[in-house]
Image (spheres, rainbow, N blue to C red):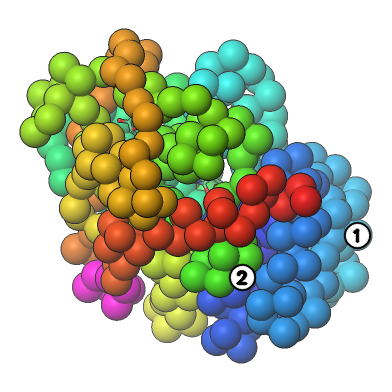
Amino acid sequence: MKILITGGAGYIASHTNIELLKEGHDLILLDNFCNSVPESVKRVEELSGKKLKFYEIDLLEVDKLDKMFAEEKYFDAVIHFAALKAVGESVEKPLDYYENNIAGSLNLYKAMKKYGVKNFVFSSSATVYGDPEETPVKEDARIGATNPYGHTKAMMEQILLDAAQAYNWNVVILRYFNPVGAHGSGRIGEDPEYPANLLPFVSQVAAGIREKVIVFGDDWDTIDGTGVRDYIHIVDLAKAHVKAVDKLSNDKGSFIYNIGTGRGYTVLEMIKAFSKACGHEVPYEVGPRRAGDIAEVLADPTKANNELGWKAEYGLEDMVNSAWKWQSMNPKGYRE
Ligand code: NAD
Ligand code: WQD
């Protein structure tokens, strides 16, 4: 299939691109590099041995977007990764998040309609569930995002489902839980300058870039008092996109899937596993709870297991080992 990848230079897209290229798909990448660098695309080319066609476009630039669709003539599918994704920043700059994520997606959806593109995979997030009533959480759980970033994801899902209904689109919405780790080669990985998420932070502490990890509370109602999350290896997550694209070829309609393992780990378990991977203790200190945090959230991935034929294969050791390999091989990320 000929697939447009928005946010094509980002963390999840880079790993997904490798898996899609392995399956013989033809990829056209689009990114504005607001949270990525061209080097990630070069590395994907190097790993896959394929030259990639790339458009440096911001989804808010309607004319450039239209020109690209006109030039490419058709896409069999679009995978839409491009978004701003930092929860804390979204609380400080909600309008930037609504503009980039909602207006940007609307421009993309309108271009798809104009050019007759009907197959779509959307990067959604466990964040749409907010603080779920039950965990593991199923796809039909109440939507209750608690921050502007989460609201943009929930809104984009709804807009997409309405458009799918009206224009006969086929849509797969993937709600990712907590993506971590890196490609086995150590050549591509997550490259945040200031990490907002646990694992990249632990990784930078392990590398001596930061002094210590602050554990956000040890008085939660969990086995050791620290927060529990469903961490998913980035390569497993990437492979879920290949299955989503297959689903679009075989079935018509709109589908929503949780992409997680169904197994949770506490913050302390993550730090311990990382210490083993890097070969020394990762220093940490217990601090206060982070505003808006919840005790525990796990995916129920049964629907994705059964309907997509997808199942997470990698365990915790693979997640932390690959993250450490990427960190040690690229101490400055892509900014060598
Ligand atoms: P990322 O920041 O590495 O990738 C997103 C890419 O989109 C970046 O390369 C960025 O430059 C690009 N981009 C953003 N706005 C754009 C715009 N207006 N026009 C063109 N390009 C634009 O993030 P990621 O972790 O790879 O996340 C990919 C998707 O998955 C996002 O939609 C994110 O919300 C979603 N998601 C991520 C996580 C996570 O923890 N990483 C969890 C759940 C969902
Ligand atoms: C994990 C656990 C923290 C950092 C976020 C978004 C979600 C999705 C994934 C995009 C929690 C604890 C963290 C630290 C810590 N992203 N922690 N010290 O909050 O589950 O999910 O990323 O869609 O929308 O909300 O992930 O990695 O920030 O936190 O103790 O320095 O680690 O309290 O228990 P989270 P996280």
Q: Secondary structure at mark 1?
A: helix
Residue at the far bottom in the pictured view: 24
Q: Secondary structure at mark 2?
A: helix
Determine the residue located farthest toward the top in the rendered image.
288
For this rendering, which residue is in front, 255 or 299? 299
Q: Residues within 10 Å of mark 1 (few under 14, many from 20)?
A: few
Tell me the residue at 23%/64% (across/down).
303
Residue segment shown in magenta: 304-311
Residue indicated by mark 2: 17
Q: Position of residue 268 (x, y in %)?
A: 24, 35
Between residue 98 and residue 241, name the one nearer to us.
241
Residue drawn at the location 66% of the way across and 81% of the way down: 48
As rendered, which of 79 and 323 lies closer to the eye? 323
**Which residue type does callout 1 highlight?**
Lys
Residue 38 as seen in the image, left or right of residue 10: right
Residue type at mark 2? Asn
Count of all numbered marks drawn on residues in the image: 2
In the picture, measured across the screen, residue 188 lies left or right of residue 104, that is left
* Percent x, y of residue 29: 74, 64
* Label 2 environment density (alpha carbons within 10 Å; few <14, some 14–19, many ≥20): many
- Magenta span main SS: helix
Is 324 magenta? The answer is: no
User: Which circle's residue, 2 or 1, is located before the other in the chain?
Assistant: 2
- Asked if residue 9 can be seen in this view, the reply is yes
Residue 324 to residue 193: above or below: below
One can see residue 29 in this view: no
Q: Quadrant of ligand 2?
A: top left
Residue 227 on image: x %, y %: 24, 30
Residue at image coords 63%, 65%: 187
Question: Does the segment drawn in magenta span residue 305?
Answer: yes
Report the residue marked by disc 1: 67
